[in-house]
Image (tube, rainbow, N blue to C red):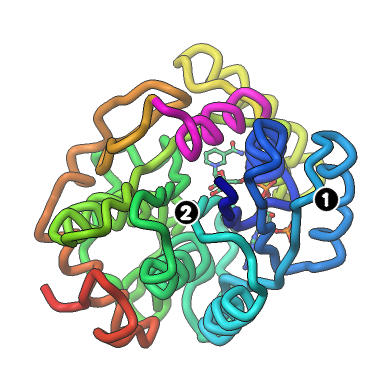
Amino acid sequence: MKRTIIITGGNTGLGYSCAGYIAGSSNDYTIMIACRNVQKGNKAAEKLKEKTGNPNIYVLELNLASFASVRKFKEDYCKGGYPPLYGIVCNAGVHQHGRLKYTEDGIEEAFGVNHLGHFLLVNLLLQNMENDGRVVFVTSDTHDSDKIQFHDAGRLAYPEKFGCAEDGYPVSKLCNILCTYEMARRLKGQGKKHITVNAFNPGFMPDTGLPKALPPILNILIPALISVYAVCIGTYSNSRRSGKALAEMMVGKTYENKTGIYNDRGKIKESSRASYDKKAAVQLWVESAEMAGLKNEETICGIKS
Ligand SMILES: NC(=O)c1ccc[n+]([C@@H]2O[C@H](COP(=O)([O-])OP(=O)(O)OC[C@H]3O[C@@H](n4cnc5c(N)ncnc54)[C@H](OP(=O)(O)O)[C@@H]3O)[C@@H](O)[C@H]2O)c1
């Protein structure tokens, strides 16, 4: 059966590796690389076609740092006439390593791209998905610390206004999990649709772009030190291994009908205590809908608490 899987940030790193495993598993899968730089996306698509022999690989522009771009992506996607939408891999991510940056909508970048952009994207597309579709949010084990808590979306979106100095990345990854569990709960109430929603932790992957987005010298030293630490505490991985585990979550039989789970490189585990806070998840959901301008009629999950 012909089906489409959208992979955000599928042009490189973990997303590219995952795209390769899915495309290589069957020509029935059409891969849509959703990326902010179409030129990079086209290069990746050509490489993937050559490597996997699957000709059904396409690219559309998606800048998760812009709500307008997310809405435009949905429009472009729906006009494209692709096979039915089966999966969305919310993989793209940024880590500013302590430097404050903002999205086009004036929101702190890690929260805006990693959580809000994906929140809007998936909600807008749920109604277009097949009844047994799958959504996976890529998170990180940096969410798993007692220090990482969700208080309110305003503090995360506008840290300077609230005098917050903490790194926005780990809490944006906690938001990915809170959003996963809340979306899974809301979708369970949908009669015909049995879309599953799960979170995936790829572990520390020193071979992707994310750990290297540090200033020169530090971008060699810090990933090397974290690699040693990650090996010691058992969180070390690479894009091949984690890309395969992520692809399995999207298309493997093992995950049929499994929803609201946290998967750490192929093993179902518990996420942090804070990630199971239902009240926080509902609050994040309602505040995210307001910030992203998502209307009730645009999502089958509803936006009210
Ligand atoms: N690497 C690790 O150790 C690690 C650990 C835990 C979790 N993760 C998670 O794994 C996921 C994949 O990251 P990676 O390690 O593969 O890093 P990566 O190689 O840097 O890939 C990140 C992808 O996100 C895209 N992206 C960034 N900002 C975007 C935006 N505004 N709109 C659309 N796309 C955007 C990048 O596009 P460009 O190519 O245009 O920059 C790139 O395709 C992320 O969610 C990350 O948080 C990674």
Q: Nearer the viewer, residue 175 or 164?
A: 175
- Return the residue at label 1: 44
Q: Nearer the viewer, residue 135 or 166?
A: 135
The residue at the far front in this view is 1
Picture residue at 58% right of the left edge, 55% below the top: 4
Tell me residue 250's x, y (percent).
48, 40
Quadrant location, the N terminus:
top right
The main secondary structure of the magenta stretch is: helix
Which mark is in front, 1 or 2? Answer: 1
- Return the residue at label 2: 169
Q: Nearer the viewer, residue 54 or 61?
A: 54
Is disc 2's CB within 8 Å of ligand 1? Answer: yes
Picture residue at 40% right of the left edge, 51% below the top: 133
Q: Secondary structure at mark 1?
A: helix
Picture residue at 66% right of the left edge, 31% below the top: 25
Task: Report whether 151 appears left or right of 121.
Answer: left
Instruction: Give the magenta part as a residue range.
Output: 240-253
- Vertical comparison of 148 with 34: above or below: above
- Vertical comparison of 163 with 48: above or below: below
- Vertical comparison of 70 with 184: above or below: below
Task: Report whether 98 appears left or right of 115.
Answer: right
In space, the residues marked 1 and 2 are separated at their CA atoms by 26 Å
Tell me residue 67's x, y (percent).
51, 82
Tag 2: amino acid: Tyr
Tell me residue 246's x, y (percent).
52, 35
